[in-house]
Image (cartoon, rainbow, N blue to C red):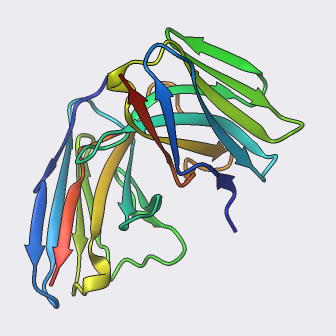
Amino acid sequence: SAVISQKPSRDICQRGTSLTIQCQVDSQVTMMFWYRQQPGQSLTLIATANQGSEATYESGFVIDKFPISRPNLTFSTLTVSNMSPEDSSIYLCSMEGPGGHEQYFGPGTRLTVT
Amino acid sequence: DQQVKQNSPSLSVQEGRISILNCDYTNSMFDYFLWYKKYPAEGPTFLISISSIKDKNEDGRFTVFLNKSAKHLSLHIVPSQPGDSAVYFCAAMGDSNYQLIWGAGTKLIIKP
């Protein structure tokens, strides 16, 4: 299966600041995804990031708060902007699998906002 | 509106026995159903999937059963091993986009 890495693995940030999370995959993929898992909850899709086009955001998520870059077929970044304690979550990136329906996930970034 | 539901927050099973994890859904338009396993401090790991046109898919110790009339699927793990202790998520995908809709997860504990 694919190797997906994320940086940082965890961070503690002050409210009002921004954090950029990096996701690197070991093979070229068209579609990458960013998810959030809030404490005690399941995963929620933030946006889909296709190389060469603007990210597509799900309801409740906006580009100003979660800007995404997808400069090539193996890399993406998610920025959490103007953070508040409510942004404390695990942020996960994923990539589409060969079957077209499964996704493979990175290890996640645990963010705590104080 | 929860489209994918896992009603059991936890399940405890003796090592060597069968573990059965359940999942219900409400949207009959889902095309694929997937099971993921998640250890603490790690991302979810894809286990097995099933197309909506099938009723069973098997991969080693893992078998997924789909009952479309009941809008229900289950994951069977046999025999259960200590390394199977994890949180298991059921997810569903529609044919119009790549979004996975996730259940709340079931924590499986395998007792020695």
Residue A64's spot in the image, x, y percent?
A: 33, 83
Examine the rendering and report whether any part of residue B91 can be seen: yes
> Is residue A38 toward the left or the right of residue B7 in the image?
left
The answer to whether A106 appears left or right of A36 in the picture is left
Q: Can you give x and y, in whole percent of width and height, for residue A50 in the image?
A: 39, 51
Q: Quadrant of the C terminus of chain B?
A: top left
Q: Nearer the viewer, residue A30 or A100?
A: A100
Residue farthest to the right, as pictured: B69
Left or right: A104 as drawn, with respect to B90:
left
Q: Is residue B66 above or below residue A63?
A: above
Q: Quadrant of residue A95?
A: top left
Q: Residue at the spot x=28%, y=61% of the render?
A: A90
Query: On screen, B47 above or below A54?
Result: above
Image mark count: 0
Q: Is residue A101 visible?
A: no
Judging depth in this view, the residue of A15 and B96 nearest the camera is: A15
Q: Residue furthest bottom?
A: A16
Q: Quadrant of residue A31?
A: top left
Place of residue A80 in the rendered image (x, y in percent of width and height, measured from the top left): 24, 75
Left or right relative to B37: residue A27: left
Residue A47 location (% of width, % of height):
43, 62
On screen, A79 above or below A95?
A: below
Q: Residue at x 10, y 85 (%)?
A: A14
Task: Give the residue displayed 62% in from the left and 44% down from the top.
Answer: B92
Residue ID at (75%, 29%): B66
Looking at the figure, which quarter contains the N terminus of chain B? bottom right
Looking at the picture, tell me which residue is in the foreground, A110 or B17: B17
